[in-house]
Image (spheres, rainbow, N blue to C red):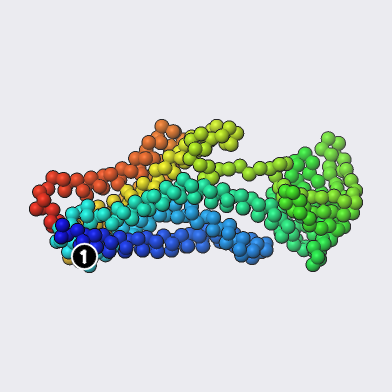
Amino acid sequence: MRHLPLISRIDRYVFRQLLVALIAVTAGLVALIWLIQSLRFVELVVNRGLSLGTFLGLTGLLIPGFVAVILPITTFVVVQFIYQRLAGDRELTVMRAAGLSPFALSRPALFVAGIATIACYVLNLWIVPASSTSFREYQFEIRNRMAAFLLQEGVFTPISDDLVVYIRTRDRDGALHGILVDDGRQPNAHATIMAENGRLVEGPAGPRVLLLNGSRQEIDRQTGRLDVLTFAQNTIDLAQTGKNGEQRYRDATEMSIGELFDPPPGMVPERDYPKLRVEAHKRLSSPLTALSFSLVALLAVLTGAFQRHGGIIRPLAAVGAVVALLAIGLMVGNLAARDPALIPLVWLVAATPGLVSAWILFSPQLFRPSADRTLRPA
């Protein structure tokens, strides 16, 4: 009983180091990945007038997905680093001399890994699908409404692959002069539209160009004759850059677990059902890698003979094992998407390394006399 306060104090000491390091490392890597990924949207701020607040709001919705992906990796890195430092400072040796078993030494890391696992489940099951849906809806809205900011004087502006707009001048009050529109959104009615003046107006689906005093030129495909229609007023919808009534289809990252296992009719083609099931199993199994990777790190640090000047082989072997497991996980996910019979391998890759590491690390203690548990070589 006299050891209980000491063990509790040690648990808190190691746990605090692990948790602080995990938060710091995860936040740093997320910030770096966010910075790299957000460069894709910098052009919208610099060249197309997107506000900084909108830019931060849009790219901020990507952060939960980054956290869900890197949290198992950062958990491994933190457990490996903190325990390796404790071993280098001889603190693990002192803890063993105090009678702590490998399980007692591993307990703070298992607590942190459990927190990371729960956080990954919360992210995968609720936060990431919601943030992904918000991101794509926000992006879709910006893409449609940014058309109003794209138009520049003296420039042929491609609003989309099949719609190009040119304006000669643009007044401060928003009036447009010398407008030319090449509209190929309807393959059978490719038209060139010219107007003397115009103005941007807001429509129900997004921005429109109100054209005044112009003409619409279109070649009749059957006769080859050029048809010219003059008008006093016409409108071009800039938001509808694809088919009429274009809608935004959801992808797998936006769907809930229930929708992945049982997609609503018409949401996705039936040929994509296996991919959705694989996504569901990956979403349910991937959080377990946080616990598995932590046990791999603990196995590398808490087993083997003590070395006065530390060792590099076991840490490198643990890093190599985790890298290999990540590569195998990607490969198995791709194979399972093609052959649903391989879906159990997704769970095996996520859970087996942790189970094997735990068995090697902890099971020998079940067969040792209590007197032998007081000290074990590092």
Residue at 50% x, 60% y: name it.
34
Towards the viewer: 237 or 123: 123
Residue at 32% x, 63% y: name it.
16
The answer to whether any part of residue 306 appears in the image is no
In the rendered image, residue 174, in percent from the top left (x then y), is placed at 79, 63
Would you say 73 lies left or right of 49 here? Answer: left
Would you say 353 lies left or right of 274 here? Answer: left
Would you say 231 lies left or right of 251 here? Answer: right
Q: Name the quadrant of the C terminus.
A: bottom left
In the rendered image, residue 75, in percent from the top left (x then y), is placed at 35, 56
In the rendered image, residue 66, in percent from the top left (x then y), is placed at 47, 55
Mark 1 belongs to which amino acid?
A: Glu
Towards the viewer: 150 or 190: 150
Would you say 293 lies left or right of 65 here? Answer: left
Q: Name the quadrant of the N terminus.
A: bottom left
In the rendered image, residue 203, in percent from the top left (x then y), is placed at 76, 51
Residue at 58% x, 57% y: name it.
58
Instruction: Report the residue marked by disc 1.
Output: 91
Residue at 24% x, 63% y: name it.
9
